[in-house]
Image: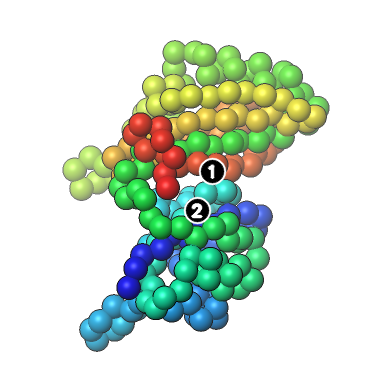
Amino acid sequence: MRCVRVWFKKMGMSRYVSHLDLMRAMTRALRRANVPLWYTEGYNPHPYITFALPLSLGMESLCESMDMRIVGEGTNDDIYNMLKDTMPPGIEIIRVSEPVCDPKKISYGEFDIFFDCDGKADETKALITEMLTADELIVQKLGKKGRHKVLKDINLIEHIREYSVSSFCDRVKLSVVLPAGSSTNINPALLADEIQKKAEISSYTLIRKKLMTENMEPFE
């Protein structure tokens, strides 16, 4: 038995597939592909499958990963070839590798947010830059107070590690690095929603590009 890490993209309409449904879809795909999965022992055996930092509903990603345990002598290339043609629409296998980092080491995520500007790309770029260079950008985030869930005010500016803003055609792209892990996690949709409201933007698309450790090294 050994553990492998399967890297995949989640694009298009698959961004509306919930984490629970994704687990079911991937389990079915693994069985269709006859991947030699390792099953837990006991009354209700099931394959060992885990995902690093599950994606929020409605977000696309270029860097999703799934860890699983397999048996037999199959190589990583063998697993890749088994899986590449069995994925549901919108999910594409990129590669299969040995796990290097523990998912608990994930601390940051790099995201691209594409804003549709209806012919006002330069104006929107200037507005976004002005917002991000201010001292405060206050939003409400659901948190806990004792056993109760409450809305808390947070200043997003304090959580932005890096960012860049560019414009092209009728779109503005904001690339941003935000906390993404078990200790601190800032959903980029909080930032995108606030910018959309203040800049009166019609719509946006969110893509997770990369996950990183505390030292800003790629999660591998």
Dot 1 and dot 2 residues touching (CB under 8 Å): yes
Q: Is residue 161 left or right of residue 117?
A: left
Quadrant of residue 157 within the rendered picture = top left
Residue 175 visible within the image: yes
Answer with mark 1 or mark 2, whichever residue precedes in sequence: 2
- Mark 2 = which residue? 64
Of 65 and 124, the residue lying toward us: 65
Q: CA distance from mark 1 to mark 2?
A: 9 Å
Percent from the top left, x then y, of residue 32? 55, 80
How many numbered markers are drawn? 2
Q: How crowded is the residue under tag 1: few (<14 C-alpha within 10 Å), some, or many (20+)? A: many
- Of residue 118 and residue 2, the one placed in the foreground of this image is 2
- Pick out the residue farthest to the bottom: 43
Q: Quadrant of residue 51?
A: bottom left
Give coordinates of residue 187: x percent, y percent.
45, 40
Q: Secondary structure at mark 1?
A: strand
Residue indicated by mark 1: 208
Pick the front one: 49 or 75: 75
Please, is residue 137 above or below residue 214 in the view?
A: above
Q: Where in the figure is residue 180, as x and y percent of width and height?
A: 40, 40
Q: Residue at x 67, y 24 (%)?
A: 166
Look at label 2 and name its amino acid.
Answer: Glu
110 vs 68, left or right, is right
Q: In terms of secondary structure, where does tag 2 sit?
A: strand
Which residue type does callout 1 highlight? Arg
The residue at 57%/30% (across/down) is: 175
